[in-house]
Amino acid sequence: MAVSLLSRLSLCRSSLHTFRWHRRYNKASAALCERLRLFESLRDAQRKGGEAAGDGPLTVRLADGRTLEARAGVTTPLIVAQRARVKGPLVSKVNGVLWDLVRPLEADCELELLGFDTIEGKQTAWRTAVCVVGGVLEGAFGAELCGEGVSESGLYCDHLLDTGSLSLSDVEERCKEAAVRKLPLSTLQLNTDALQQLFQNSKLRLQLVEELMDGQTLTVYRCGDSLGVCDGPLLPHTGILKVFKMLQVCFVYNLSQPQCSSVMRLLGVAFPGEREREEWEREQEEARKRDHRRIGKDQELFFFNDVSPGSCFFLPKGAHIYNTLTDFIKSEYRRRGFSEVVTPTLYSTALWERSGHWEHYSDNMFTLASEGTQTYALKPMNCPAHCLMFEQRVRSWRELPLRWADFGALHRNELSGALGGLTRVRRFCQDDAHIFCTPEQLEEEIVACLEFVRCVYRVFGFSFHCLLSTRPTPCLGEQQLWDTAEQQLQSSLQQFGERWEINPGDGAFYGPKIDIQIKDAIGRQHQCATIQLDFQLPIRFDLQYVGRDGQTHRPVMVHRAVLGSLERMIAILAENFGGKWPLWLSPVQVMVIPVGGDCESYGQQVVQRFHEAGFMAELNEEHGATLNKKVRSAQLAQYNYIFVVGEKECVSETVSVRTRGGKQLGRRPMEEVLSLLTLLRDTRSNQDEF
Amino acid sequence: MAVSLLSRLSLCRSSLHTFRWHRRYNKASAALCERLRLFESLRDAQRKGGEAAGDGPLTVRLADGRTLEARAGVTTPLIVAQRARVKGPLVSKVNGVLWDLVRPLEADCELELLGFDTIEGKQTAWRTAVCVVGGVLEGAFGAELCGEGVSESGLYCDHLLDTGSLSLSDVEERCKEAAVRKLPLSTLQLNTDALQQLFQNSKLRLQLVEELMDGQTLTVYRCGDSLGVCDGPLLPHTGILKVFKMLQVCFVYNLSQPQCSSVMRLLGVAFPGEREREEWEREQEEARKRDHRRIGKDQELFFFNDVSPGSCFFLPKGAHIYNTLTDFIKSEYRRRGFSEVVTPTLYSTALWERSGHWEHYSDNMFTLASEGTQTYALKPMNCPAHCLMFEQRVRSWRELPLRWADFGALHRNELSGALGGLTRVRRFCQDDAHIFCTPEQLEEEIVACLEFVRCVYRVFGFSFHCLLSTRPTPCLGEQQLWDTAEQQLQSSLQQFGERWEINPGDGAFYGPKIDIQIKDAIGRQHQCATIQLDFQLPIRFDLQYVGRDGQTHRPVMVHRAVLGSLERMIAILAENFGGKWPLWLSPVQVMVIPVGGDCESYGQQVVQRFHEAGFMAELNEEHGATLNKKVRSAQLAQYNYIFVVGEKECVSETVSVRTRGGKQLGRRPMEEVLSLLTLLRDTRSNQDEF
């Protein structure tokens, strides 16, 4: 079972859906019986191991600070929940690690009990629902399943059935009936040896296991008579799910088997009860209203066109937001000692071979031929160009750190089926920068990067926390290099002082990294900023500097971005603000409405004055509409401030100010309002009133 | 003979060298004798025609205002020059049209006599030298010639000889010997009929004539026993050329015959005397010093790398200039009602087919395939994207004019052999904008465009004049449309009030245009800005707006650019300023040199203060060097201002200011200097002192 956390876009990795193929053994064959038996014996062994290891008393500390006594190998999170009267838990976290509710605790621990109102809870419910839906598709509809999983927005089951034969409400009904039978679910963490034992008769399964395995163990589940592989905990039994809602059936492009064109995907969600379903529907409605594609269209910010799939056309108002964001970052660059550079778009494969991208990333690159023999690729990232700049001449320690920023357009050849709005594009710009520094400077540079991130996210009103991803297996570079770097990153994080966690083994193969997880105004999490160490590129480009000692040394290279993709950040901000842009970002800041024909020239003066001061100000030249209607339509068009100017205002050089939200701020001297708005804009305030 | 005016880069046309093939008939064959006879008889006929038409008295007005009496069909510009005691004329202009010195005048006229100090004079000398050098290559070295011509920097002869067999000094010597024989040269303007008669026995010649013919007539010359085709006047005889200098032999990539790889190009120059040669060498040395590639390297502004031929890497200081220029234009956009848009880089061929670029321009486009069937091309220009934006929804006359500006990177697939520095690149950005307006708005919009150009060029200190290029043959669009548009452009130019000329028949096939010819500080001419009307794209995209009358109408589209290619403008500016950037553009504005260790922290404060005010300020941290040496090296590095701070300055919060040019402006309060520099920068002054 695949969890595609769509929100986690790595800076250097394409995040296409991974399809995970397996076959369910739900017709009780001899082989299946044997497997089920083996599964149970392995579970017993694991249980006994747990009991043997512990069986003593342990202390559980809950998130609210309470502590409870429990028994190792016996007490489960579900029992703790019952004793602590925590309602509706679906899954737990033991010392930060996801843990099935019915899996006994093993030692003293911190325990979080997570309900449907958490992402982990929702995904556990949906992961379980996948077992139910899959069973129904196979059992009741005879579908051949070929992939399944959950994302932040629901569950999916891929199958080879024709769409016509599926009625969504039918599936819902049958799922409800199946779930009610309270099929117990159990999971087991198995290592490669145990997995090979369990699946020894199935080549397909072993292949799958090999594909899925990216740590030491893999989770195997049993649901009724079905065995499967999943990558997260499940509910104790299916009966916890009371409501199933199937959303749509669509065609999917299958990466592993592009020739197989008949794979259909059933999308759905499931809930522990009607209350959760209603809440989810409210959220959906809110999200629909906030959808950046809708805001983009309504506000004439941007559009897409089939002549350039995945590349956005920013209309003047969208380009205003785009440039305002860029200017914000540029002003921070100036304060923080970054210099901008401008680099080419097309590079010969010779460069990509040197950087290693050709080996690891060429599938995602747009390539073209020129003058017969030469092959060029559109850059998917800027780092190799910056390495060329570094090696342009001999560098001295006196020059370091060098901090080079590049807003160059990047292209990544995502499949057209995977494109959507501003969040999945083929062409984008990043507030990308690379730092070349001495190993001794690293800690300070990382703290400075983190402070940069905090400064920007404060302006947006995002809360955030950091994830330190450490060395994966396999990885490149000396052990000691990794040790030191990971220690330096930890020490930077400590010094920085914000909440952070370790994400073991999730670093890139070329170095550890810090990802910054933000939470927006509607509680959604995104990962945009990243700070990645790179030990490999300086080696590949043989980058060197002359140290204070007169010897040559290898610099450390840091990739970092704060906004990440500007396109994606605009989508996040549009949805975060629900289209109500704060003054400084707003492409429609001031609407001046003259009342009576005599005031039009004064209105024009006001517009002129604000325009000269750098504001987006417009004169309402509609004739015929009532004042109220004009005000209302300016508010709907999200003008931050509406100035009504009549005879009184004209004589006294004032404006009557209303906010987008409907507040009347009274008649004020024009120059005073100009100063106040200038202050709000220049401090990038999110405040409306003054 | 081909004149490739390298400085005239059209916005929408690639300006590759055109090779023009012909074969000289210098071995007196029967066919040649027949041709020579025909040539002479045609010349006699033309002469007689001239005599018949005129043979009366006429008045010649010279450039200095003098008038002389002469006889039509008899008096030549050379005779006028002798009578008026004008020394060293090489060619003339009669009523603005180039005219051989020995071609009799036909009617009252204004006559300019042009010497070697003019571009026209130089090119006439070099065009004549081509005949001499070509004859020597064929006669003395047995070379087979396959192309020849002149450019602003000299002459070239393409041939199929091996390089090894040519000694440059040998060629020079033999040319001198040949020229001394004073071979007379005569030219004839012939129309198609006469050309077909003259070359009736030579298919190759007729092909060539067809290729070269882009007006009504073509120039045929006779030099000794050789006949050839050229596109400009020649000297009366070869004896005027006293000095020949061959510069180099290089391999050329032959566009017409790419399979033929052995074409060698001999480059050279020739002079009427030693004085002119010395003057030319001084200019060459000056140009070498000012060469933007040298300035780019010395000042660490930019570099090129083989991994991306024709695409520039702008280092921080170059990017600073790049961004400062862009910001300048952006601030003007805001004042002048332009809005920026951001558009994709890659577009499907469907768009290029619709716009007509696929038919006319695809050879110059980088194309690539994606997902098997789709072909995309990197945009070589922005116009089709802006048409898509226009047609995005129904437009009203109330919205017009729409002025959309786009700094998007453009790619044009120039041959790698044609690339050089920032002036011949494959990737560049323009300050490109398109105006969509009603026909009634056109005149006002054009005046506004011209005023925009004047405003920017005044800042650079360029003088300029305008060329109105009218309809070519053939052209697209109704006669009446052209009439009205050309009248409107003329009327805009009148209103604008700067010097302008008509360039008949040189418009694009899709509309007339105004090119702006600038003259830089060292007297060189460049064409950067352009204002082009386009009748075709609005038709191809079926662009419409709803007029005041409720009916739909076709908008007029204007392509315009002021800087043109930013890359090329940076090259022009670098050479114009000789690397001495004015304060506002300079990437190194202030160098603070502390005298004595105690002053370093005060020096740091000064740097900080100027940095915060947006200046590029640095602290000199060199130890050991003398003050004089530090000042000198800051001046050589082109820091606009050098602040020396010692104990006195530290105590009094002053700085001792020196300019790059060596002027000492005395000890001044730091805040005063800051205000003065801020004023100089913000007004984009070219002044140094204050």
Image (tube, coloured by chain):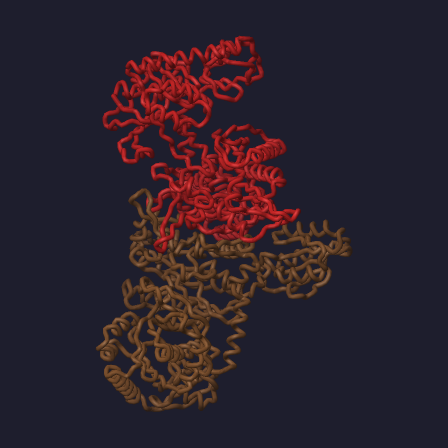
Chain colours: A brown, B red
Tell me residue B369's x, y (percent). Answer: 36, 51
Locate residue A346 relative to residue B115 in the image: left or right: left
Residue at the far front in the pictured view? A164
Rendering coords of residue B172 (x, y %) = 31, 20
Quarter of the C terminus of chain B within the rendering: top right
> Measured from the top left, where is residue A252 in percent x and y?
38, 66
- Which quarter of the figure has residue A534? bottom left
Residue lying at 58% horizontally and 42% vertically, measured from the top left: B683
Q: Is B301 drawn above or below residue B223 in the view shown?
A: below
- The answer to whether one can see residue A394 in this image is no
Does residue A441 sit above or below B530 in this rendering?
below
Pick the residue in front: A598 or B23.
B23
Relative to residue A29, is residue B16 drawn left or right? right
Residue A674 place in picture, x, y as percent: 66, 56
Drawn side of residue B186 relative to residue B616, left or right: left
Which residue is found at the position 39% from the left and 63% from the top?
A10
Depth check: give the residue in front, A598 or B331. Answer: A598
Of residue A672 and residue A118, the one placed in the foreground of this image is: A118
- Residue A620 in the image: above or below residue B505: below
Can residue B468 be seen?
yes
Q: Quadrant of the N terminus of chain B?
A: top left
Numbered label tally:
0
Q: Quadrant location of residue A114? A: bottom left
Question: Measuring 28% from the left and 72% from the top, which residue is drawn there?
Answer: A208
